Image (cartoon, grey):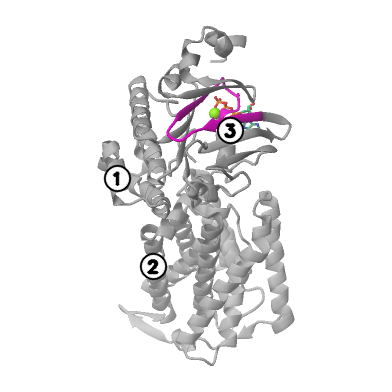
Amino acid sequence: MNDQPILKVDGLSVAYGPVRALRGVSIEVRRGRTVSVIGPNGAGKSTLLWTITGLLKPAAGSVELEGEVISGLKPETIARRGLAIVPEGRHNFLSLTVADNLRLAQIAGRRRGGDEALYERTLDRFPVLRDRLDSPASQLSGGEAQQLAIARALLTKPLILLLDEPSFGLAPLTVEGVFEELVRLKEEGMTVLMVEQNAGKALEVADDAYILSNGEVETASSAESLKSQEDFDAAYFGEGGAF
Amino acid sequence: MLQHIFDAAATGSLYAVIALGIALVFGVMRLVNFAYGELLMVGGYVVLLTAGLPWPLIVACTLAAVGIVAFLMERIAFRPVREADPTTMLITSFAVSILLQNIAVWIAGRRPKGVSFGSSLSEPVDIAGASVPIVEPVTLGVVAASLILFVFIMRKTELGVQMRAAAEDFRMARLMGVRADSVIVAAFVASGVLAAIAALLLVATTGSVSPYMGLQPVLIGFVATVIGGMGSLIGAAVGGFALGAVTVLLQVVLPESVVSYRDAFVFSFVILVLLAWPQGLFANRAAEERV
Ligand SMILES: Nc1ncnc2c1ncn2[C@@H]1O[C@H](COP(=O)(O)OP(=O)(O)OP(=O)(O)O)[C@@H](O)[C@H]1O
Ligand SMILES: [Mg+2]
C-alpha cells in the first residue's frame, strides 16, 4: 500500500484542437515526496496539471489517485477525493474577503476531516492572512495572494498538493519565502507535485524531477542526480535557450 | 410629489427583484435566461388558479410552483446544453420561453384574464399627507424583506459563499469541491422564487395575467443587469431600481406632448449610462468568460 504512488499519470495525451500539448506523458508521485516538473514555456506543464484536476479531458492515457482512476471524473469529485491545486495565476476569489476564501476551502476540508485546529495551524503558517481576514482578496499583494492560494489549498486537507509556478511574478525575497514554505510542507509529510520555470529552486526542494519538453517527458530522475548532471544545462536550456 | 416618489420606489423595487433573478443565473451560467419572463408568467397563472384560497396559501403555492418549474427548466432544458457554446444556450432559452408561452395560450387562451388577488391593496392609504395605493408600501416592504433575506443567504450561508465564488470563477470553485450542479440548481430555484415574488406583486398591482406578461419584465431585467454590470448582483438590483424609478419619474416630468415617447427617453438614459460606464455601474472581473 505504501509503495503505491499517490498519483500516477500514465501515457497521458492532450490536444487543444490540432495542437498536441501532451504526448504520452507518464509520471509518478509517491507519498510524502515532492516532485518537480520543469520545462520551457509551452512545454505542456500547465496542461498536465489541468488535466490531472479533471478540467481538461485527455485524448488518451489515465490518471490514478491512490490506485483509483480519476480521469473522466468531474473536477469537483476529484477535488473531494483529496486533490488540491494552486493554479497558475492563483485564481483567488477577488470579490470575496480573505476570510470567505478560506471559508470556502474549509467547507471542502470538513468533508475530509479538516477541523478548527487545521484552520488555526494554517493561519499560524501565514500570519499575514490572519491580519487581513476582512480585506477583499483583491487588495492583497502578490506575495500575500500566493499565501492565500496555498492556505486555501491546504485547508481542503489534500492528499496531494499541485502547484503551478508558485514563484511566478514574485519578488526574489518573496520567492524565498514560498520555497521555505514548500520545504516545511515536505518536512510535515505533504505530497507535492510542482511545476516550475525556476529550475534551480525547484530542484532544491524536489525529491524527484521530470523535464518536460514539447509535450513529452525528456528526462525522469532524482532531483539530486539531475542537479549534478553535467549535460543538464544542455538538455534544459538547449535549443535556443527557452528561458 | 411624495406620491410620485412612492410610485417610483415601488416600480423601482419591483424591477430590482426582476433583475436580480436574471443576474443570479447569469452569474453562474453566463446565460441570459430569457425564459425567466415565463417563470413570472407561470407565477401569474398560479395566482389565477388559486385565487379562491386565503392569501398566505396563494403566496406559498406560487413560490413553490415557480420554484419547481425553474428547477425542471434547468434539469430538462439547460443541463443538456451546459457545455455547449453560449449561442446554443441562448437559443435554448428563447425556445423554452416560446414553448411556455404557447402552453399557456393552449391551456388558458390568448386573452388576458382578470385576477382579484390583492384587489383590496389598491385602496388608497394616507402616508405623510400623500395618498398612495396600499400595494406600493406593501411592495416596498416585501422587496426590502426579500433582499435582506437574500443578502443574508449569500453572505452568511455555505451555499451563499459557494454561489458567490462560482459566480466569480466557476472553474476554480469546482476545483475547490463546489458541485457545479448544486450551485446552478440553486441559482435557478432562487431565480424562480424571485420571479414568483415579482409575479405576486405584479398581479396585485395590475390585476390581470396573460401568456405574454413575462415579455416586458424580462426585457427590463436584462437591461437592468446590463446597466448594473453583467455578473454583479448588487449592480443588477441597483440597475433595476434606477430603471424603474427613471421610468416613473419621466412619466411625471415629461410634457404631455412627448410623454408617449417615454420609453425612448428611458433608453436614451440607458445609452448615456453605458457610454459613461461601458462595463456597467458595478463591473468587476466576475464578468469574465466561464469557459
Ligand atoms: N487554451 C489553449 N488553446 C490552444 N492551445 C493551447 C491552450 N493552452 C495551451 N495551449 C498550447 O499548449 C501548449 C502547452 O501549453 P501549457 O500552457 O501547458 O505550457 P506550459 O508548459 O505551462 O507553459 P508556461 O511555462 O508558459 O506556463 C502550448 O503550445 C500552448 O500554446
Ligand atoms: Mg504554464
Tags 1 and 2 both on a single chain: no
Give the image location of residue B184, x and y in percent: 55, 59
Total number of numbered discs in the rendering: 3
Question: Magenta residues?
Answer: A24-47
Pointer 2: what residue? B149
- The reply to whether the residue tagged 3 has its Cβ within 8 angstroms of ligand 1 is yes
- Three-letter amino acid code of the residue under disc 1: Leu
- The reply to whether the magenta stretch includes residue A28 is yes
Q: Classify 10 Å Cα crowding around label 2: few (below 14), some (14-19), many (20 and above).
A: few
Helix, strand or loop status at disc 1: loop
Chain on which label 1 sits: A
Pointer 1: what residue? A133
Residue at 51% x, 23% y is A209
Badge nearest the viewer, 3 or 1: 3
- The reply to whether the residue tagged 1 has its Cβ within 8 angstroms of ligand 2 is no
Mark 3–mark 1 distance (CA, rounded to whole Å): 33 Å
Q: Which quadrant of the figure contains the C terminus of chain B?
A: top right
- Three-letter amino acid code of the residue under disc 3: Leu
